[in-house]
Amino acid sequence: MKRDVARDLVYKIIFQMNFHDDFAERYEQMILDSGIKGTQGEYAKKTVKGILDNLEEIDDTIKDNLKGWKFERLSTHVIAVLRLGVFEIMYNEDIPPLVGLNEAVSLAHTYSDEKEATFVNGLLNSVYKKVI
């Protein structure tokens, strides 16, 4: 199984965190229920846990790179893909930051319109340039 399937699952799980008070207790079961196992299941668990553990800093990074937007006005699916992208750029040492950026933009193209995907690309590029 390719990592993009696991990354898609992570996006869907992070998207759901805004709708469930018990999210932190449920995400591992969500991964098990998905049928993703092995290396990809571990990637999903590590990534969701990493996002949760660093959520405040990830959100602050997003806010620091918004130009003319307020965080609260971003759609839930854009926030989810940005959180995943920022995590992969800043915290995931298993993949190059540029790969994390490109994969997040690919998810934005899948789950958003062209305007939102362009917005995600611009913001994540800004984060990437500050990290490298």
Image (cartoon, helix red, strand yellow):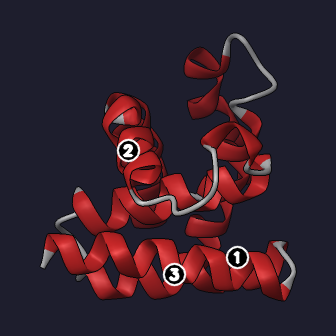
Label drawn at residue 58: 2
The numbered mark, 3 or 1, whose residue comes first in the sequence reads 1
Q: Residue furthest right?
A: 113
* Residue at 45 percent of width and 44 percent of height: 45
Q: Residue furthest left?
A: 132
Q: Label 3 near label 2: C-beta < 8 Å?
A: no
Q: Residue furthest top?
A: 21
Occupied quadrant, residue 99? bottom left
**Residue beneath label 3, please?**
122
Q: Label 2 near label 1: C-beta < 8 Å?
A: no
Q: Nearer the viewer, mark 3 or mark 1?
A: 3
**Residue beneath label 1, please?**
108
Measuring from the top left, give residue 112's x and y in whole percent: 83, 74
Q: Nearer the viewer, residue 100 or 61?
A: 61
Q: Nearer the viewer, mark 2 or mark 3?
A: 3
- The amino acid type of the residue labelled 1 equals Ala
83 relative position to 91: left or right: right
Measuring from the top left, give residue 15's x and y in whole percent: 72, 45
Number of residues whose C-alpha sits closer than 10 Å to that of mark 2, classed few (under 14), some (14–19) or many (20 or more)? many
Q: CA distance from mark 2 to mark 3?
A: 16 Å
Instruction: Confirm whether residue 1 shows in the render.
Output: no
The numbered mark, 1 or 2, whose residue comes first in the sequence reads 2
Q: CA distance from mark 3 to mark 1?
A: 12 Å
- The amino acid type of the residue labelled 3 equals Gly
The numbered mark, 2 or 3, whose residue comes first in the sequence reads 2
* Residue at 76 percent of width and 55 percent of height: 77
16 relative position to 68: left or right: right
- The amino acid type of the residue labelled 2 equals Ile
